[in-house]
Amino acid sequence: MMEPINFKKTENEENPLSEGSGSRDKRTHVRIKVNLQFKYLMHEEMGDFQTRDELIKIEKNGRILDLGLGGIQIQINRPIPVGSFLMVYFFLPNITKGLAINSEVVWSNQDKAGLCFVMVKNEYFEVLKDFLDKNSKK
């Protein structure tokens, strides 16, 4: 099941997944520097393919520069309009299962953008949380 992340601090900080839109203008989660490849699709492109080859043609690539429970900063080769919704796909080091997360562009310039996670599957949230817990203490 996917649930929206509530970006306001909650009494139960261990599980910030809850119903409601929350506030996206202040970070409440730690971010760590990473250098990960990722692929993305704009939401309006998601139904426009019939075969894997067609999907590969419309997928776009970039790099994740930092990562937190609430979102990512990405490096891309073209600007993405603020307010756009994306599906981002990426793998974390030493994790065999890839993550696919709905995101919204909250800021963008020529080659970078900030994405806020909109909906995260519970299992992906736990994988992200474990990864961040292990790597933020280094």
Image (cartoon, helix red, strand yellow):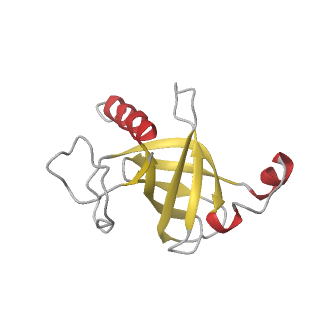
Q: For the C terminus, give its image quadrant.
A: top left
Q: Residue at x 54, y 71 (%)?
A: 109
Horizontally, residue 22 falls left or right of residue 122, namely: left
Position of 4 with respect to 13 (left or right) is right
Query: Residue 9: where, in percent of width, then height?
Result: 20, 55
**Residue with the most extreme front position:** 1
**131 is higher (above) or lower (below) than 121:** above
Residue lying at 69% horizontally and 60% vertically, measured from the top left? 46
Extreme-left residue of the structure: 11
Q: Nearer the viewer, residue 108 or 59?
A: 59
38 relative to 24, above or below:
above
- In the rendered image, residue 87, in percent from the top left (x then y), is placed at 58, 55
Residue 96: percent from the left, percent from the top? Answer: 57, 26
Image quarter hosting the N terminus: top left
**Residue 85 falls in image quadrant:** bottom right
Relative side of 30 to 46, left or right? left
Estimate the x, y position of residue 31 in percent, counting from the top left: 35, 47
- Looking at the image, which residue is at 86% across and 48% down? 53
